[in-house]
């Protein structure tokens, strides 16, 4: 099984840990990153020397293509804005593909390559991580047995424990977190896509303990990009809400008001043109190195309402709660993302996913996916309420 993990950061490391723990002897692992030393360290420590490290700049498409020709599948754990051209390289090199999400717009662009992927005999999963990814599969599970679907609601919450001292802690890429808090979400409401204000749509959501109550708000995500089409059955709305971090909002709100998160204009700094957003991202990234990481519990919830074959209306909810600590990760977001990325990567490497651009909710059968999670001690509960 030849799998290439692109990106040697927190999420890429989690993907590698799961691959090494579950595939074992027949794994041929490649690790690529712009920072060769980081890729080499990950190959040495996380994969026990099993991985081959490469210095990779994702903008060097010819180099990336020449590397991927030797692999069966790539798990793209780089920033989501790289997704489209990495996927295009996979189409050229004949390598199956998975990424961890495209914040709606990039995912929609990727789905337009479906015909080309089929023609080239490539399978490409768009959004095969924790959320999107596991959340999408939970929606498919919740909708099973329904002849018509009215609404699909997806929630992601968390609870952090411990103290990281002063400053913000980012559970994943600083750039992605900032985009999730500032870009206008696109939701599927009343049968059409609607752009809504960032941080709007507040709703109190009660997740299983120990996560408990989160105030969740609309956030730009890939679930609404694919679920309306794959769920079908007349679905009228698909919404995604993210548990809000009051500390993050307090920190980012004044920066938004001052235009400090804008990438549209450049400011001269010591002879270099720098966007305010690039400075902010670099600042938070520099603060995060060497800092103490909080323990982070994660809860995912999917709620689907519709009608069963006997004509009875019902609401079905699926819940998943994940504790920190597995594979040594204090951040359960990283762990769950790595697990899902590894599962989709393995199925792609074994050619078990149909050709074309495939959303995660239909890429692998729900029972098979639940079985894979079960091997790792992760379970999804399902509750049906009539009426």
Image (cartoon, helix red, strand yellow):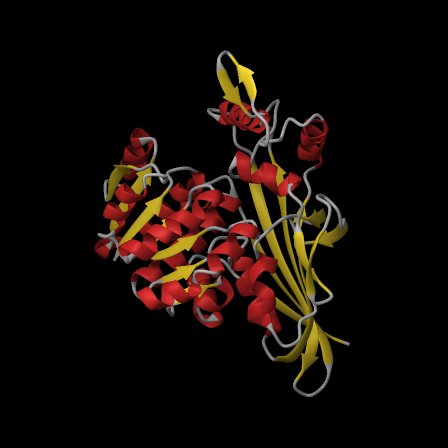
User: Which residue is at 56% across, 62% downward?
Assistant: 226
User: Quick one: 102 or 262, which is closer to the camera?
Assistant: 262
Indicate the quadrant where residue 160 lies.
top right
Percent position of residue 25, x then y: 22, 54
Left or right relative to 172: residue 216: right
- In the picture shown, does residue 281 fall above or below 12? above
Q: Where's residue 327, x and y in %?
A: 41, 44
State the image coordinates of residue 111 (x, y, percent, origin top left).
48, 60
Q: Is residue 288 visible?
A: yes
**Which quadrant is the N terminus positioned in?**
bottom left
The quarter in which the C terminus is drawn is: bottom right
Q: Is residue 272 above or below residue 293?
A: above
Where is residue 328, by image quadrant?
Answer: top left
Residue 127 makes an appearance in the image: no
Give the left or right position of residue 345, taking residue 194 as reference: left
Residue 89 appears left or right of 210 = left
Q: Position of residue 284 (x, y in %)?
A: 55, 26
Q: Nearer the viewer, residue 171 or 349?
A: 349
Residue name at image x 54 percent, y 28 percent? 281
Query: Residue at image x 24%, y 52%?
Result: 69
How many marks the image carries: the answer is 0
């Amino acid at each position: 099984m030849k799998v290439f993990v692109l990106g040697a950061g927190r999420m890429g490391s989690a993907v590698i840990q799961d691959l090494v723990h579950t595939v074992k002897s027949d794994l041929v692992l490649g690790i690529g990153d712009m920072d060769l030393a980081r890729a080499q360290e990950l190959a040495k420590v996380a994969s026990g020397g099993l991985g081959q490290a490469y210095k990779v700049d994702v903008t060097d498409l010819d180099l990336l293509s020449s590397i991927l020709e030797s692999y069966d599948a790539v798990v793209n754990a780089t920033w989501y804005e790289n997704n489209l051209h990495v996927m295009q390289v996979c189409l050229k090199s004949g390598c199956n593909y998975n990424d961890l999400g495209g914040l709606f717009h990039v995912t929609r662009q990727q789905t337009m390559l479906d015909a080309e992927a089929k023609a080239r005999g490539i399978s490409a999963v768009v959004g095969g991580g924790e959320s999107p990814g596991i959340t999408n599969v939970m929606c498919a599970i919740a909708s099973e047995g329904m002849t018509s679907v009215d609404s699909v609601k997806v929630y992601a919450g968390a609870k952090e424990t411990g103290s990281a001292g002063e400053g913000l802690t980012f559970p994943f890429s600083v750039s992605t977190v900032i985009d999730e808090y500032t870009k206008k979400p696109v939701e599927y409401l009343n049968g059409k896509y609607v752009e809504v204000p960032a941080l709007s749509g507040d709703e109190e959501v009660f997740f299983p303990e120990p996560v408990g109550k989160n105030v969740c708000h609309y956030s730009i995500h890939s679930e609404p990009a694919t679920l309306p089409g794959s769920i079908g059955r007349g679905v009228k709305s698909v919404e995604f809400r993210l548990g809000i971090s009051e500390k993050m909002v307090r920190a980012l709100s004044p920066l938004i008001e001052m235009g400090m998160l804008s990438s549209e204009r450049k400011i001269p700094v010591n002879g270099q043109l720098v966007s305010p957003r690039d400075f902010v991202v670099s600042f938070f990234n520099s603060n995060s190195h060497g800092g103490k990481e909080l323990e982070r519990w994660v809860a995912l919830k999917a709620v689907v309402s519709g009608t069963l074959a006997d004509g009875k209306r019902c609401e079905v909810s699926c819940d998943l709660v994940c504790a920190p600590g597995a594979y040594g990760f204090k951040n359960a977001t990283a762990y769950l993302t790595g697990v899902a990325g590894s599962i989709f990567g393995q199925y792609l490497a074994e050619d078990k996913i149909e050709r074309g651009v495939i959303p995660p909710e239909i890429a692998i059968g729900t029972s098979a996916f639940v079985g894979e999670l079960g091997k790792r001690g992760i379970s999804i509960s399902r509750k049906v309420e009539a009426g």
